[in-house]
Structures are given as structure tokens and as C-alpha cells.
Image: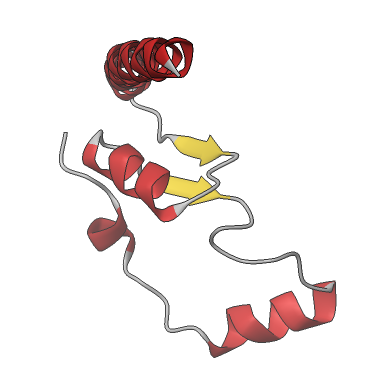
Amino acid sequence: MVVNVATERHEARLTERVRRMSIVLVARQTAIVRTIIEIVHNLKLDVVADGVENEDNLRRLSDAGCEQAQDCCLSKPVPPAEFFAWCLACEPVPYSERRRSR
């Protein structure tokens, strides 16, 4: 039993260390993404994020200044006819309202 308790404590410490490392990694990744977005904006280009897998990533990208995103968390792939019908049904957004002020 003592070995199990020591193992559980070790696992708890290891889990905590991994959690802290994950937080640091996310912070570093966020800093890198923000820097890339800033560089792209300095080049007077829009940012399109590809591979956005969940709402949390979408929110973080939006908070970082990413204007557009694509992947399955936004829409599953649809047949071309369905896509065109969807486009025709959408109300156009004036270009001035789509652009971020820079």
C-alpha cells in the first residue's frame, strides 16, 4: 500500500507538472500566433486560419486579430450545389464592415 500511495503522489506531481507545462506551451503558442498575425497585418494582408478544430481555438484566434477561419468546427464539407445555394441565401456584408481597422 505504501508504494501505491507514493505512486499516486508521484502521479499527482507529474500531472501537475504536465498541466503547468501545457499552460506554458499554450502561452508560447499564443504569443507565436499573435506575432504571426501582427506580421501579416503589417504586410496589409488578411489572416485566414486553417485547421480550427474547436470553439476555444476560434475564440483565441479571433481575440488575436484573425479575420477569417475555416475547418470542420465551422461547417462540415458540403456539396458544391449546396454551398452555392447557401452563398446566394446569405446577405452580403459591406466590405467596409468586414475589414478590421488597422
> What colour scheme does the image use?
secondary structure
**Residue 100 vertical position relative to residue 22 in the rendered view, above or below:** below
**Residue 72 vertical position relative to residue 81 in the rendered view, above or below:** above
Q: Position of residue 62 (x, y in %)?
A: 30, 44
Q: Position of residue 42 (x, y in %)?
A: 28, 17
Depth check: 28 or 81 in front? 28
- The image quadrant where one finds the C terminus is top left
Q: Name the residue located 25 percent from the left edge and 58 percent from the top edge.
A: 96
Q: Position of residue 88 (x, y in %)?
A: 60, 85
Report which quarter residue 17 is drawn in: top left
- The image quadrant where one finds the N terminus is top left
Depth check: 17 or 94 in front? 17
Q: Position of residue 59 (x, y in %)?
A: 31, 48
Depth check: 34 or 45 in front? 34
Compared across the picture, whether 33 is left or right of 51 comes to: left
What is the number of callouts on the image? Answer: 0
**Residue 14 vertical position relative to residue 76 in the rendered view, above or below:** above
Q: Name the residue located 33 percent from the left edge and 25 percent from the top edge.
A: 44
Compared across the picture, whether 85 is left or right of 16 comes to: right
Report which quarter residue 101 is drawn in: top left
Residue lying at the far front of the rendered structure:
1
Q: Name the residue located 28 percent from the left edge and 15 percent from the top edge.
A: 20
Q: Name the residue located 33 percent from the left edge and 15 percent from the top edge.
A: 9
